[in-house]
Image: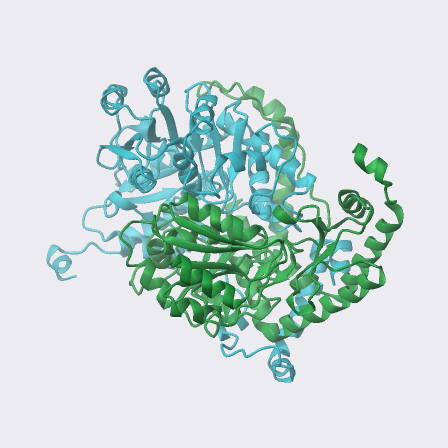
Chain colours: A cyan, B green
């Protein structure tokens, strides 16, 4: 079997293995009875659900992510794996590093992908840049700021929140006043606040942070590849994202990059970060960023996830970032017009503050948003979502990112929405109260 | 494109997308020049390495893992994804939970898979079960104990180590004495110490821990599916493993289970765990283990990784655990005899203490182990590895796990080893010193 796998092409080997495996499944019950059980005293039997095949329905993923994964990325992810410490794997990781540098527009050497979701990058950023007792300032205008504040509090930071309602944004003046007041070592801002559909302006904030000797941490999970960001030019010290939004890879990896200022802070700390797994002294070695000749074992990276991430970055490199930004803006504009034609109101009134990847719609008067979404999933196999955290009950969200960012998909989404609005009849006030 | 993807079968859609993508690549350079750059001031160009195709060589992964992934699991992982919070995804996660309960031989409701490697499970176990200042006892006889000790120290535990040389093991009497002395809230032991090739006896230790009101934490990353473990019968309170060993899935997910005693301790703590991402109050809800009607968003799980993990657990459920254990024992025995015929000495002298999934060989006198391994990789495209942590320079490791656990693979591995021993001539002592 093994020899066959490595010699034949993958599809052939897959067919052979599938045939073999179904034989196994068919005879598994009598086989179990024939076994010598002397090694064991198994009392928990194989669960019946595990003897049924995996079922995965096809869905249009038009929510805030994960987004549909293009076949080219799925194919990369489905390739036979190699070892996480093989030289060929290091080449792939080096390519990923260069791809992230491009999409972040940074020359930072300290640029890697986390073995985990955007939350892993979030924790990595905070755990490494902050020591217990240090002051952290967090801009909260949706869910992500709240998350970062919670993470920083858990690791012992002295957290200060600047709070606005979902969709609100902070002027540079407000930010500078708060930085002056709280003297944080780190200021956090979400570039793409997906819970509210806001794309926050970033220009000038990095300069404020430098002036006041504070690191500038920015979350671009929902915006990367969809809206311009320039890590170096905008003086962002730590930038991270996720794989499953405009990058279109499956969830499970998360690009992150650190400026020299951030490196200086994190590699001159008095205490070790609380997490061994997210410690950048180890991760920087694993990714070959620390100048050491040997890359040592730290943890086992998600080999297939890195194949997929590399492919997703390659697609953007081939297209060009500008083209990706232009396309998201154009398709989002097309969606806004269609929503207007349906009589729907966008949640973010200022067009230039809208996140091109995730559009938020104010819930139309008298409708139950859960009912609308359930109707769309049931009748159109299409995911749209409600709000998240503080925006729950305020918005419906449509995400058209990367591969899904096409006018034809806008048409489908609008058709589904129109159908739902027609069929999920408005509730009279009296009925509403009963529920 | 999107419509086409969801209607056609995956292979057809992949071909179409590949053709489309290669057209894109061919015209990417002129396209970039034609673009309206008014949105951007891109200064970092697309890296040349990202415009080349992904290259992944085929390798026999006969090291301590990751192991070769069978085509059936790769195919599961390559399927179009769905949302991480869709009802169908919850069904898949529920199946995974049942599969882990079977392979762990436990009825624990608090059984999940981490969105991360075995290290994520390690940190999850320690972060949730221990509060700062509490006493933790760690058995160190290879690398994994050292890792857990470091993790516990970072989160503020009072760590006590019991240390033996790699391959050494602890008697129940020694363990009970240490537990009495240090009064830990948690005792850690590695079941499959892959750095030394040791499979540590577990019987009776859970009882000692109960008697002294201490939780028993066991690492089965390298042993699960290859050597018997009975979480409930052996009174193990927290058990975790990894996806990429005998389970044969790609790295990136990690099964973990908590007993009622462990749940009682971790859900009645005074402080929050340092990690938000690994907090079991959130993860237990995400996995539907907390009895709450709604499973709320916490982080984005690795959807494709869960498809792969489910498939790997299904394969073991179909085969039966006993058959998997029997096969690993049989194939390991066949390997031991072959190694003996080559004049090689096993690192663990006691046959019944050897880890069936990973076999350790004492480095043959006068050979340079790095040279042997490099020869085998170069001439046989086969990974075997050296030691890890304290066993570096002491052993060569051959892993034949799950799908790779076949006598035909033993033959290939022995052939490669014999060839290397013949061609990597013994070094005279003088030469050795020069290096």
> Is residue A131 toward the left or the right of residue B137 in the image?
left
At 49% from the left edge and 66% from the top edge, which residue is drawn? B100
Q: Please state the horizontal and vertical placement of residue A306, each as a whole percent of the image.
A: 58, 42
At 30% from the left edge and 41% from the top edge, which residue is drawn? A150
Q: Please state the horizontal and vertical placement of residue B62, each as a whole percent of the image.
A: 71, 55
> Which quadrant would residue A119 be assigned to in this image?
top left
The tally of labels here is 0
Quadrant, the N terminus of chain B: top right
Q: Please state the horizontal and vertical placement of residue A140, each as a whole percent of the image.
A: 27, 35
Q: Please state the horizontal and vertical placement of residue B78, each as a whole percent of the image.
A: 58, 53
Of residues A378 and B414, which is closer to you in this image? B414
Quadrant, the C terminus of chain B: top right
> Is residue B336 toward the left or the right of residue A323 in the image?
right
Residue B74 appears in the picture as rendered:
yes
Of residues B428 and B69, which is closer to you in this image? B428
> Is residue A50 toward the left or the right of residue B324 in the image?
left
Residue B117 appears in the picture as rendered:
no
Of residues A74 and B150, which is closer to you in this image? B150
């Amino acid at each position: 079997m093994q020899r066959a796998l490595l010699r034949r092409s993958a599809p052939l080997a897959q067919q052979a293995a599938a045939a073999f495996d179904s034989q196994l499944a068919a005879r598994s019950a009598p086989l179990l009875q024939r076994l010598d059980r002397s090694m064991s005293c198994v009392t928990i039997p194989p669960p019946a659900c595990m003897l049924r095949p995996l079922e995965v329905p096809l869905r249009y993923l038009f929510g805030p992510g994960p987004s549909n994964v293009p076949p080219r990325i799925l194919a990369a992810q489905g390739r036979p794996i190699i070892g996480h410490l093989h030289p060929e794997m290091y080449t792939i990781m080096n390519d990923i590093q260069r791809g992230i540098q491009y999409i972040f527009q940074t020359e930072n050497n300290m640029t890697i992908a986390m073995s985990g979701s955007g939350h892993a990058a979030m924790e990595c950023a905070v755990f490494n840049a902050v020591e217990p007792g240090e002051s952290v300032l967090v801009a909260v205008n949706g869910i992500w700021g709240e998350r970062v504040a919670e993470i920083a509090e858990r690791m012992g930071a002295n957290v200060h929140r600047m709070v606005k309602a979902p969709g609100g944004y902070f002027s540079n003046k407000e930010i500078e006043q708060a930085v002056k007041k709280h003297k944080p070592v780190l200021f956090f801002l979400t570039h793409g606040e997906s819970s509210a559909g806001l794309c926050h302006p970033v220009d000038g904030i990095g300069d404020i942070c430098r002036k006041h000797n504070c690191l500038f941490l920015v979350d671009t999970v929902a915006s990367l590849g969809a809206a311009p960001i320039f890590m170096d030019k905008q003086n962002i010290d730590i930038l991270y994202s996720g794989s499953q939004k405009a990058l279109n890879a499956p969830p499970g990896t998360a690009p992150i990059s650190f400026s020299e200022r951030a490196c200086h802070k994190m590699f001159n700390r008095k205490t070790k970060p609380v997490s061994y797994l997210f410690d950048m002294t180890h991760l920087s070695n694993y990714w070959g960023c620390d100048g050491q000749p040997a890359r040592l074992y730290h943890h086992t990276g998600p080999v297939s996830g890195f194949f997929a991430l590399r492919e997703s970055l390659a697609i953007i490199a081939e297209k060009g970032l500008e083209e990706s930004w232009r396309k998201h803006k154009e398709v989002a504009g097309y969606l806004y017009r269609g929503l207007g034609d349906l009589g729907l109101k966008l949640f973010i009134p200022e067009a230039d503050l809208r996140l091109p990847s995730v559009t938020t719609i104010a819930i139309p008067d008298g409708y139950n948003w859960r009912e609308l979404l359930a109707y769309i999933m049931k009748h159109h196999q299409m995911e749209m979502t409600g709000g998240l955290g503080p925006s729950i009950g305020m918005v419906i969200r449509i995400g058209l990112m990367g591969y899904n960012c096409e006018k034809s998909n806008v048409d489908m989404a609008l058709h589904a929405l129109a159908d739902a609005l027609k069929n999920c009849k408005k509730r009279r006030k009296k009925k509403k109260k009963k529920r």
